[in-house]
Amino acid sequence: MSSYEATSLRDLQCGHVGVEQEGRRVSVCGWVAKRREHGEHLVFVDVRDWTGVVQAVVPGTVEVRPEFVVRVTGTVSRRPAGTANERLATGLVELTDCDVEVLNAAEPPPFPLDERVEIDEAVRLRYRYLDLRREPMQRNLRVRATINRALRAALDAQGFCEIETPLLWAPTPEGAREFVVPSRLHPGEFYVLPQSPQIAKQLLMVGGFDRYYQIARCLRDEDLRADRQFEFTQLDVEASFVTQTDVVRFVSQAVAAAAAAVTGETPDEIVTMTWAEALDRYGTDKPDLRFGMEIGDLTTAFATTAVQALVAPSVKALRVPGGAEMTRSRLDALTEQARALGAKGLAWFRVTASGLESPLARHLSPDESAAVATLDGAGAGDLVLVVADEHDRACRVLGALRVSLGAPPVGAGPYRYLWVTEFPLFEGFDEDGDLVAAHHPFTMPLPEDLERLESDPLSVRSQAYDLVLNGWELGSGSVRIHRADIQSRVFRALGIGEEEAASRFGFLLGAFRYGAPPHAGFAFGIDRLTAILVGEENIREVIAFPKTQSGTDLMTGAPKGITARQLRELRLGAVRPPA
RNA sequence: GGACCUGUGGUGCAGCUCGGAGUGCACGCCGCCCUGUCAAGGCGGAGGUCGCGGGUUCAAAUCCCGUCAGGUCCGCCA
């Protein structure tokens, strides 16, 4: 009983009361989970803290309700024969002859804190402090702390130095929309909250910290999703005198350590796939490798097809095992989904023992029918979906259908990690006809592609890489450009003139003139990793005080107006949209 | 900006298709009873703007329109 959990008020935690303490008189503190009254001579009070529940036997009556905060002093006793509770970790013992001290009374909570019913999330968020008292949130946030601890230990062991970077940063309009903070001392001027510590960590490389990491909060004023909050946490890493290989090794080790700390199992070596292969086989840059259903190619088989709807540069197909049972309305819904994803249409073929069933079936040549019927080892009862389009679009449409038809819940194991490499440097053109960076403008092209930077920029691959787990993008990184000549060429391709580059990134480019080492880095989302490892579909379940999808905080009421005085001090006027 | 799902005592649900009195179930809450329970049990009771507004109708939780809130997704997230 001399462990760290003892305090001035308690000797040990509720879940740790056991036969080892038999006969001793101990105090525990916690919340009343349940009271079972048997007349005026006997009351059972279950006392709960995050470690568990212990039963206190009180002679006589006691005025407590669930969620009262109590300090119970009693004698640890083996339960009478036949009354042990196997479902309780402390079920062999109980506290007898108890004194119950009410440390604080409590109103009945707005929802039950046991796990038997699922509570509406809006109610949970409004009373988050009560929701946190429940077992799932206790478990999730403690797993998160375990992950943080493991990541720090792994990086510390590899000689990384943890450094904090500013939350108040300079606006560098590019990429994600930034949260803006008005300056009181400089009216009319603004800081922004960092969408990531990207530039700061590159400056740390120039500053000679050759291995940096940070568990960093990032803020992006973009619409929220199940896997996206305004503010999220990344393990941010950067190192000098390294290549992609080194960074992949660092991060793989750190992630493996975190996963092992949670699951007890070290993941297999993480497989690697190029971006082009991922798109071709899975129709996405974040493939979920837990299930098959790879995208097949029918371009050759349909090269001379008479079916107009299937005349396209690329004909891609997906086998849906057992999908022949889908009703016509289900297939219509799939077609609608494909259209919403940008496809001109979706052709479907039921594979039966007697051939293909489809509105298009009788228009196919025998060779075409055979190609469809044998796609990906198809057999009777399967469904084959076909999209004819530009290669990338056909793959992406089928990739999205693949996930919606076949993917298990993200947290349902096994855990399949994947490095996706050789991303394109540019993802296309903006409305001004300028190229758009796929990662960020400081990403190093692959050396062998550098000569095509001006002549065929969309074909240029970069030294950028993503880490993917079960179809979720955990994070991304790249080798950075550290040479001014290459940076100038990339800026020029992006339509960023020298003047603009100087005004936006001048301090970074300036720093690079004074001896920037070759460097590379990575960042991945701890919210997402935690969610997957605890089996949650939603990162709100691993965040203590998350926002709703519309960006509000149901507990605090944020965002809210501020006082006229605050506005005056900031020289701001609040303009409300017309009612 | 768009699509879809949800909204019924404090909580979780049913009722909604096919309109007919706020009807039902479980938990919780209050009172009484009960000396070995642990989802304790028994008896009794309180508790409702059916999210909100409008429309149709003799009559709306139920049908229609709008709106708000929560969620999932598309756009967005270098």
Image (tube, coloured by chain):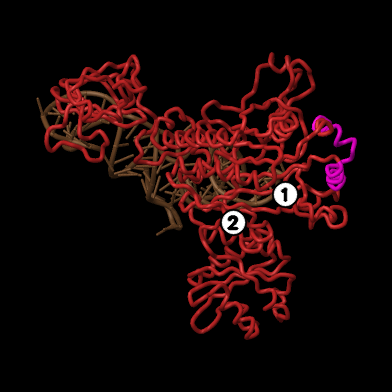
Chain colours: A red, B brown
Give the amino acid type for the residue marked by disc 1 in the picture. Gln
Badge 1 crowding class, 10 Å Cα cut-off, few under 14, some 14 to 19, many 20 or more, is: many
| Mark pair 2, 1: CA separation | 19 Å
What secondary structure is marked by label 1? loop
Residue A457: image quadrant is bottom right
Q: Return the x and y of residue A125 as percentages of the image width and height.
A: 49, 33
Q: Return the x and y of residue A472 as percentages of the image width and height.
A: 57, 49
Specify whether A257 is left or right of A214: left
Q: Quarter of the image containing the N terminus of chain A?
A: top left
Residue bearing mark 1: A463
Q: Return the x and y of residue A519 as percentages of the image width and height.
A: 72, 39
What secondary structure is marked by label 2? loop
Looking at the picture, do discs 2 and 1 lie on one chain?
A: yes
Looking at the rendering, the stretch of residues picked out in magenta corresponds to A485-510
Between A561 and B68, the one lying in front of the other is A561
Between A217 and A454, the one lying in front of the other is A454
Residue bearing mark 2: A287
- Magenta span includes A453: no
Specify whether A253 is left or right of B15: right
Q: Mark 1 lies on which chain?
A: A
Q: Mark 2 lies on which chain?
A: A
- Magenta span includes A508: yes
Q: Is residue A525 visible?
A: yes
User: Looking at the image, is mark 2 or mark 1 earlier in the sequence?
Assistant: 2
SS majority, magenta = helix
Up-down relation of residue A18 to residue A283 (above or below):
above
